[in-house]
Amino acid sequence: MIDVSQFKPKTVYVTYIAATAERVWQALTDAAFSRQYFFGFAVEVEPKPGGRFRLLWPDGRVHVGGEVVEWTPPRRFSCSWLAEGMKDFGELPVCLVTYEIEQSGESVKLTMTESHSWDVPPAILAGGQQGWPKILSSLKSLLETGTPLAGANDGPPAGFVEAVRKAVAEKPWLK
Amino acid sequence: MNRPKFVYVTYIKTTADKLWVALTDPATMRKYWFGAFAETDWRPGSKWTLKFDDGRVADSGEILEAEPGKRIVIRWRNEWKEEIKAEGWSRCTMTMEPYQGVMKLTIEHEMEGDGTKFIEAVSGGWPRILSNLKSLLETGSVAYETKA
């Protein structure tokens, strides 16, 4: 398993949801939910530390692969995360994604933290910074209204593909 | 040199008009801003005051830009906590854009100087306020009712 002490938080997104912790947990870990709010991807998790984590395209191809690092329902779910299905991207070091669910007043506070083990350039971090607000806004709408936002994936932000290609060529994490 | 800055993006199933009203109408603000509301006429150059539920002044400033349905820029200073007020002015930009049938709302809150306490405070506040705003516009009620 990865050494989480090597990872530093780079992107944090917090949202408050009028739902129970159990419902938010289910939405994060169940494919029937994730297909609706996560750009159509089906989440697939082996529910134990060391278990396999994947996000799958509707046709079954792997978009993201990883390993469960922490599994404490309905409070904390952490996994390594690599978009191995994207060109070049699969050669980057894995990142660590952690979902934390806390009761806060009558609602639930959901904190998503994306952590990295190397000095990731801003142009690569921008990918997650563009995606997470869409995904988690849609998750909140789904749980509160029964309907997700349309949220088609409109591709990576400007400069993202070039930054990934450059990082893969130079491999700054080895230095 | 990067100044301390907080950025938050949320997508809300609503119209540009309804979002504008929610961001500028004091009675609507009170519902999702834990009772707080703004006093201003939303014209560039006008004074802007954010008041707590009980009428005490929370923050003060000036409207720098206001374009209905699109953009608000406020020069913004804390008025109720000495150590945060001492950090001086910040600038808050609210940007509203139609996006795939919903509205994308971006809040960028940046210090004019290099203090970090103000940005820490708003980093905790904005996600609560904007989660509530989204719930209010999509469901008619807020997610989180506890007073600030």
Image (cartoon, rainbow, N blue to C red):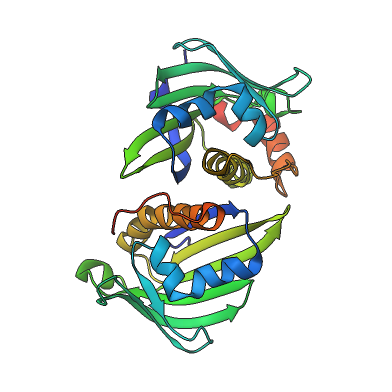
**Residue A168 seen in the figure:** yes
Give the mark count.
Answer: 0
Quarter of the view holding residue A8:
top left
In the image, B95: left or right of A97? right
Which residue of the protein is positioned furthest toward the right in this rendering?
Answer: A59
Q: Which of A55 and A126 is in front in this view?
A: A55
Q: Which x, y percent locates residue B119?
A: 37, 60
| Picture residue at 63% right of the left edge, 70% below the top | B17
**Residue A121 seen in the figure:** no
Identify whether B130 is placed above or below A82.
below
| Picture residue at 73% right of the left edge, 52% below the top | B100
Report the quarter where the C terminus of chain A lies: top right
| Picture residue at 73% right of the left edge, 24% below the top | A57
Q: Which x, y percent locates residue A89?
A: 69, 29
In the image, B113: left or right of A138? left
Which residue of the protein is positioned furthest toward the front in this rendering?
Answer: B140
Which residue of the protein is positioned furthest toward the left in this rendering?
Answer: B82
Quarter of the view holding residue A30:
top right
In the image, B133: left or right of B50? right
| Picture residue at 51% right of the left edge, 69% below the top | B23
Q: Which x, y percent locates residue B35?
A: 33, 66
Q: Which of A134 and A108 is in front in this view?
A: A108
Quarter of the view holding residue B85:
bottom left
Identify whether A72 is placed above or below B37.
above
Q: Which x, y percent locates residue B143?
A: 42, 49
Q: Which of A103 and A81 is in front in this view?
A: A103
Identify whether B32 is placed above or below B91.
above
